[in-house]
């Protein structure tokens, strides 16, 4: 999934350096394991569509 963000940057001095870095989220599809457990309160507070 690729997402994009549009924004305007003001023109800066010639000594201005802007560094942008992107880091992908790693998903382990090889070893399906439970990484955490939700308690009752967390489940009840999950957003529901409709």
Image (cartoon, rainbow, N blue to C red):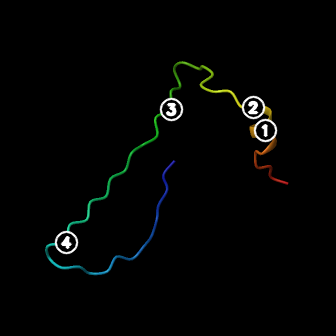
Quadrant hosting residue 11: bottom left
Mark 2 or 3, nearer chain start: 3
Neighbours of disc 2 within 10 Å: few (<14), some (14-19), many (20+) = few
- Which residue is labeled 1 in the image? 41
Q: Position of residue 15 (x, y in %)?
A: 14, 73
User: What residue lies at 20% left-to-right and 66% top-to-bottom?
Assistant: 17
Disc 1 and disc 2 in contact, CB within 8 angstroms: yes
- Give the secondary structure at mark 2: loop
Q: Nearer the viewer, residue 40 or 29?
A: 40
User: What residue lies at 51% left-to-right and 20% top-to-bottom?
Assistant: 30
Q: Is residue 43 above or below residue 28?
A: below
Mark 1 or 4, nearer chain start: 4
Disc 3 and disc 1 in contact, CB within 8 angstroms: no
- Give the secondary structure at mark 3: loop
- Which residue is labeled 2 in the image? 39
Q: Residue 16 has which mark? A: 4
3 or 1: mark nearer the eye: 1
Q: Identify the residue at the far right of this view.
A: 50
Q: Identify the residue at the far left of this view.
A: 15
- Which residue is labeled 3 in the image? 27
Residues at marks 4 and 2, CA–CA distance in whole angstroms: 48 Å
Q: Position of residue 22 (x, y in %)?
A: 37, 50
Mark 3 or 1, nearer chain start: 3
- Give the secondary structure at mark 1: helix
Q: Position of residue 21 (x, y in %)?
A: 32, 53
2 or 3: mark nearer the eye: 2
């Amino acid at each position: 999934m690729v997402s994009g963000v549009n924004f305007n940057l003001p023109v800066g001095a010639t000594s201005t350096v802007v560094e942008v870095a992107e880091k992908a989220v790693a998903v382990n599809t090889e070893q399906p394991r439970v990484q955490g457990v939700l308690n009752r309160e967390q489940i009840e507070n999950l957003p529901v569509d409709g």
